[in-house]
Image (cartoon, grey):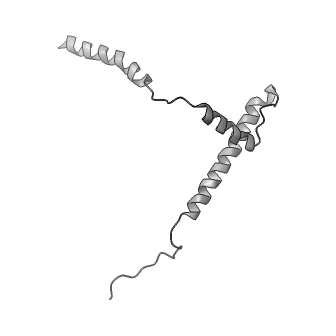
Amino acid sequence: MKMLVKTVFIVAAITLPVVSNAQQTTPVTRAQVESELAQLEKAGYSIEGSDLDYPGTLKAAEARLAAQQDENARRRGLQTDYGSNSGGSSNSGAR
């Protein structure tokens, strides 16, 4: 019985890292990279900038892009709602 427990423990210890590292990631295409770069350039990022400014300017452009996307998503959400806002009161049945 002890041998069975040890064997199960050893097999679990060996297979757990293999299973946890198996990630399904799809490769990014060239068109996707070019599209993302074009969006960042529209948000104010410039490739020709100084290497000293690289991380800061990229993060700032990504933040502006994320804010724009959030605003666009919020606007789309407002435009796709159906009906009008009501006070929330309702009457059912007669008393």
Q: As drawn, is 95 to the left or to the right of 56?
A: left
| Closer-to-camera residue (29/17) | 29
Task: Please tell me which residue is depicted at 61% across the width and 36% down the height of the picture.
Answer: 32
State whether residue 27 is above or below residue 64: above
Q: As drawn, is 83 to the left or to the right of 8?
A: right
Q: As drawn, is 80 to the left or to the right of 40?
A: left
**Residue found farthest to the bottom:** 95
State whether residue 11 is above or below residue 38: above
**Residue found farthest to the front:** 31
- Residue 5: % across, % down: 23, 16
Task: Please tell me which residue is depicted at 42% across the width and 79% down the height of the picture.
Answer: 90
State whether residue 54 is above or below residue 17: below
Q: Is residue 65 visible?
A: yes
- Residue 64: % across, % down: 71, 45
**Residue found farthest to the left:** 1
Q: Quadrant of the C terminus?
A: bottom left
Q: Quadrant of the N terminus?
A: top left
Task: Please tell me which residue is depicted at 51% across the width and 72% down the height of the picture.
Answer: 83
Which of the 4 image quadrants contains residue 75?
bottom right
Q: As drawn, is 72 to the left or to the right of 57?
A: left
- Residue 11: % across, % down: 30, 15
| Closer-to-camera residue (55/88) | 55
| Closer-to-camera residue (91/30) | 30
Number of residue marks: 0
Which of the 4 image quadrants contains residue 49?
top right
Q: Is residue 43 visible?
A: no
Task: Please tell me which residue is depicted at 77% across the width and 32% down the height of the picture.
Answer: 47
